Image (cartoon, grey):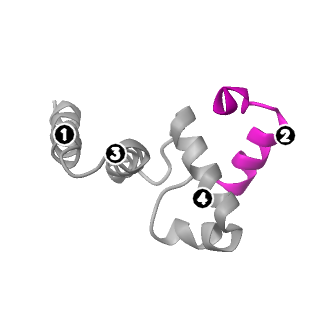
């Protein structure tokens, strides 16, 4: 029951934020809100949009991206490199 209440609270928070944000900014903040309740050792599956956003941030400034984990939960640089290496970006350019 506790988990269901948290999900409802997160959904309400994201709905309220949608009045002020849109597009990638809303997706990024919604992911951060969802991850705020996750335990440090819990696993999380990144969505394609999350990976694309992280990749854009990484290519904009790799040094700044490495400093971001102090503020945000982001895919590791290794995850992004594997994404590029495996050619999983075809949907991004279509």
Residue 9, position as x, y percentages in the image: 16, 41
How far is the residue under mark 1 from the one under mark 4?
25 Å
Q: Report which residue position mark 1 lands on.
A: 15
Work out whether mark 1 precedes mark 3 in sequence or the reverse, and give the earlier one: 1
Judge whether residue 77 is colored magenta: yes
How far is the residue under mark 1 from the one under mark 3?
9 Å
Q: Residues within 10 Å of mark 3 (few under 14, many from 20)?
A: some
Residue 73, position as x, y percentages in the image: 48, 56
Q: Report which residue position mark 2 lands on.
A: 85
Residue 15, position as x, y percentages in the image: 18, 39
Where, by quadrant of the figure, is residue 46 drawn? top right
Dot 2: element: helix
Q: Residues within 10 Å of mark 4 (few under 14, many from 20)?
A: some
How far is the residue under mark 4 from the one under mark 3?
17 Å
Is any part of residue 75 visible from this angle? no
Work out whether mark 2 precedes mark 1 in sequence or the reverse, and give the earlier one: 1
Q: Which range is magenta?
A: 76-94
């Amino acid at each position: 029951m506790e988990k269901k209440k948290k999900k409802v609270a997160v959904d309400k928070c994201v709905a309220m934020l949608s009045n002020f944000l849109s597009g990638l900014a809303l997706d990024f903040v919604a992911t951060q809100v969802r991850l705020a309740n996750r335990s440090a050792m819990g696993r999380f599956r990144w969505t394609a949009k999350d990976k694309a956003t992280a990749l854009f941030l990484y290519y904009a400034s790799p040094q700044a991206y490495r400093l971001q984990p102090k503020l945000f939960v982001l895919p590791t640089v290794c995850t992004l490199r594997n994404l590029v290496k495996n050619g999983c970006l075809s949907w991004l350019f279509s």
